[in-house]
Image: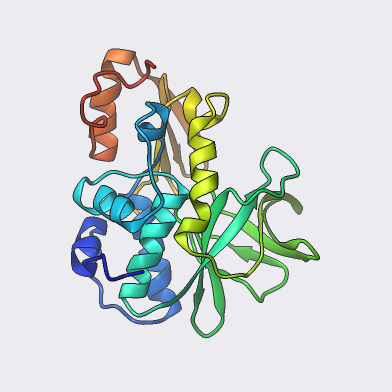
């Protein structure tokens, strides 16, 4: 998986210059660096330009074009970087539960084996920003709040926990996948105009390692800092300039509007 990747160039893209150790602090620092430098964004999908799951697509997009993407691109590329750096990595297939029950594998997450296995994700939007121990029961600090991994006969459910109440985010089984396994989900999600990916453009990333966060939506930019959220309207003619200012990237080549179809 990692042979298509120049690890140093990828680390430079992340602004990561620390020594690489095969330990939890390094893994956590890499996860935060990725979430800060590489946006979770849907611009190619929103504009109907098409995306793929393979590394020949995702790595150049993230590293050379300095863009972001969604889970199949971001977690696929990040898993390849981790493998190139010597980490023991598995690709996990998950069913997203944010809109209710679901058994379709429509999300890619990562398992990394260190002293114990950890769940890592850089492609699920506003979710945990620190590795979660997969064999641990009870609440865990995800870097931006509490999370819990709930076992069941259907798999393990990642849940955010607010005031002791868990909210399911996605469910997965710890079974190894390859990137091609996610092609049907990628093709289906980007082809359906009724889904959120095709409704409005967005880009989101951490600020300075988090947990502060910036999110650009179709008509506004939102800053979450120290637990407070502030929003500022963004006009259509200001959208690309705002994207460049806060995410270091413009619109995909040949496009002139951030909000139009």
Residue 128 visible: no
Number of labels in the image equals 0
- Could you tell me residue 182's position as x and y percent? 51, 53
- At horizontal 49% and vertical 63% (from top left) the residue drawn is 130
Query: How did the renderer colour the structure?
Result: rainbow
- At horizontal 37% and vertical 71% (from top left) the residue drawn is 82
- At horizontal 44% and vertical 55% (from top left) the residue drawn is 122
Figure quadrant of the C terminus = top left
Q: Quick one: which residue is furthest to the bottom in this view?
A: 115
Residue 78 visible: yes
- Could you tell me residue 52's position as x and y percent? 39, 46
* Image height of 234 relative to 136, above or below: above
Q: Quadrant of residue 93?
A: bottom right
- At horizontal 18% and vertical 62% (from top left) the residue drawn is 9
- Could you tell me residue 191's position as x and y percent? 50, 31
252 sits left or right of 259 in the view: left
For this rendering, which residue is in front, 104 or 84?
Answer: 104
155 sits left or right of 195 in the view: right
158 sits left or right of 19 in the view: right
For this rendering, which residue is in front, 66 or 133?
Answer: 66
Figure quadrant of the N terminus = bottom left
- Could you tell me residue 173's position as x and y percent? 66, 65
Q: Quick one: which residue is furthest to the right in this view?
A: 153
79 sits left or right of 227 in the view: left
* Image height of 6 relative to 129, above or below: below
């Amino acid at each position: 998986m990692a042979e298509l990747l120049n690890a140093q160039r990828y680390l430079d893209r992340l602004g990561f210059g620390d020594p690489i150790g095969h330990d939890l602090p390094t893994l956590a620092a890499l996860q935060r660096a990725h979430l800060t430098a590489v946006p979770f964004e849907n611009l190619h999908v929103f504009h109907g330009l098409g995306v793929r799951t393979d590394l020949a697509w995702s790595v150049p997009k993230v590293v050379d074009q300095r863009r972001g993407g969604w889970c199949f691109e971001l977690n696929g590329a990040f898993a390849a970087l981790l493998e190139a750096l010597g980490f023991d990595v598995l690709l996990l297939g998950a069913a997203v539960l944010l809109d209710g029950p679901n058994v379709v594998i429509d999300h890619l997450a990562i398992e990394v084996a260190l002293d114990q296995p950890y769940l890592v994700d850089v492609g699920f939007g506003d979710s945990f920003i620190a590795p979660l121990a997969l064999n641990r029961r009870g609440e865990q600090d995800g870097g931006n709040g509490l999370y819990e991994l709930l076992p069941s006969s259907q798999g393990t459910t990642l849940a955010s926990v607010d005031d002791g109440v868990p909210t399911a985010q996605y469910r997965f089984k710890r079974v190894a996948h390859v990137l091609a396994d996610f092609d049907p989900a990628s093709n289906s999600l980007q082809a359906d105009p009724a889904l959120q990916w095709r409704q409005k453009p967005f880009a989101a990333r951490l600020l300075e390692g988090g947990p502060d966060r910036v999110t650009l939506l179709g008509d506004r930019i939102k800053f979450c800092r120290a637990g407070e959220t502030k929003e500022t309207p963004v006009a259509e003619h200001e959208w690309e300039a705002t994207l460049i200012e806060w995410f270091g990237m413009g619109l995909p080549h040949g496009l002139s509007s951030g909000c139009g179809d």
